[in-house]
Amino acid sequence: MQDFETGTVVCEFGEYKLPEAYTRIAIEKKVSELVLGVRPEHVKVLVFKREGGFPGRVMYTEKLGRELVAHLKIGDTRLTAIIPPEQVEVVSREEVWVSFREDKLHVFEKHSGKNLLNL
């Protein structure tokens, strides 16, 4: 269910509050379904609960130079996060909270595949 009036969309892993710019465009263009996209370096992983975050689990990690690549699972959704050395270090099977940098979020219209900002 999408409630663009409040900016809330339902994802596979829970409700997500869209940034206002995307909400306005979705209403204006009468978009019915969206796909959210985020690059691994823009996924935030925390060991404590955070407003707007989703509970998840670290499936496994791997070192990539100074950075840590964390393979995560939120519900049935798998995603990857690149965690810089100054951020918290996580370990396999650890419970975490996952959120996204809203200024780096990509939102697409599901049927056309077009970025909402380019409709």
Image (spheres, helix red, strand yellow):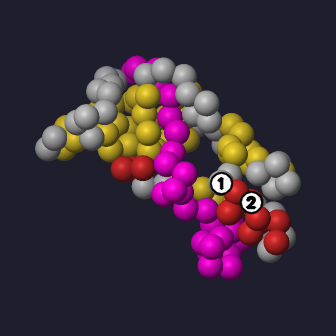
Kindly identify the amino acid type of the residue bearing the numbered disc 2. Thr
Comparing 85 with 114, the one in front is 85
Q: Point out the stretch of residues depicted in magenta.
A: 93-119
Inspect the magenta stretch and tell me whether residue 47 lies in it.
no
* Whether residue 113 can be seen here: no
Q: What element carries label 2?
A: helix
Q: Left or right of 29: which side holds 14?
A: left
Q: Is residue 91 above or below residue 62?
A: above
Q: In this view, does 10 lie above or below 22?
A: above
What percent of the width, then of the height, locates residue 15?
Answer: 71, 40
Comparing 57 with 98, the one in front is 98
Mark 2: few/some/many CA within 10 Å (<14, 14-19, 20+)? many
Q: Left or right of 77: which side holds 80?
A: left
Q: Would you name the residue on which mark 2 appears?
A: 23
Q: Left or right of 65: which side holds 2?
A: right
What percent of the width, then of the height, locates residue 28?
Answer: 82, 72
Q: Is the residue under label 2 in contact with that under label 1 (CB below 8 Å)?
A: yes
Q: Would you name the residue on which mark 1 appears?
A: 19
Give the quarter of the image for residue 37.
Answer: bottom right
Mark 1: few/some/many CA within 10 Å (<14, 14-19, 20+)? some
Q: Which residue is drawn at 81% across and 55% down?
A: 4
Give the quarter of the image for residue 33.
Answer: bottom right
Kindly identify the amino acid type of the residue bearing the numbered disc 1. Pro
Q: Residue at x 55, y 51 (%)?
A: 102
* Whether residue 64 can be seen here: yes
